[in-house]
Amino acid sequence: MSQSLRVRLLGVVSAWRGAAEIDLGPGRQRAVFTVLALRANQVVSREALMDAVWGDSVPPGASKSLYSYISRLRLALGRDTQVLVSERSGYSLRLGPAELDVHEFDALRETAQEAWQRRDFAAARGALDAALGLWDGDALGGVDSP
């Protein structure tokens, strides 16, 4: 499991380790992963996760379901890695800047802005083209939750 994780949110939500796509599971489990990825490297409380997945209709067994989703995601991501960690008040998905397409998009956008300010329009266009190339459909595709 030494290969880096790669997470896509700018299109259908997916995760890859090397060339192998990781099965993020069914709808609500995928929604939990998505919320954690959107807030990568931050602790997301259990309550915030349940609210994001179920909205105003949190069922009585949601806490147990959330625990199951987290356990299955840990298995899918690799138990020997420190990617999905428990914190006192919730969970955190630890991703480096190059592992999340949204971070890469922001870095390319900033590069384009800097090039534009230097009046290096070719470099600005190249960075913007690369940023737009990260998109593959609607952001957060395949996730249906509040």
Image (spheres, rainbow, N blue to C red):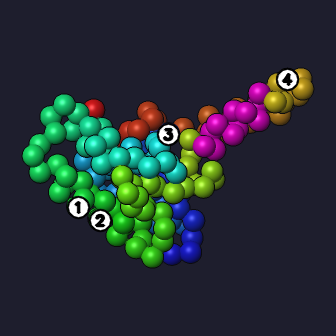
Quadrant location, the C terminus: top left
How far apart are the alpha carbons under marks 1 and 3? 26 Å
Residue 64 x %, y % = 17, 57
Given this view, does label 1 or label 4 mark the residue nearer the observer?
1
Q: Against 59, is 132 above or below? A: above
Q: In this view, does 53 lie to the left or right of 35?
A: left
Classed neighbour count for the residue bearing mark 4: other residues with Cα under 10 Å, few (<14), some (14–19), many (≥20):
few
Locate residue 107: give its quadrant: top right
The residue indicated by pointer 3 is: 10
Given this view, does label 2 or label 4 mark the residue nearer the observer?
2
* Magenta-colored stretch includes residue 112: yes
**Could one spot residue 142 in this view of the protein?**
yes
* Magenta-colored stretch includes residue 65: no
The reply to whether dot 1 and dot 2 touch (C-beta < 8 Å) is yes
How far apart are the alpha carbons under marks 2 and 3? 25 Å
Q: Which mark is residue 117?
A: 4
Residue 11 x %, y % = 46, 40
The residue indicated by pointer 1 is: 68
The reply to whether dot 1 and dot 3 touch (C-beta < 8 Å) is no
Mark 1 lies on a secondary structure that is helix
In percent of the image, x 19 and y 31: which residue is there? 56
Label whose residue precedes the other's in the sequence (1 or 4): 1
Residue 34 x %, y % = 39, 46
Label whose residue precedes the other's in the sequence (1 or 3): 3
Label whose residue precedes the other's in the sequence (3 or 4): 3
How far apart are the alpha carbons under marks 1 and 2? 5 Å
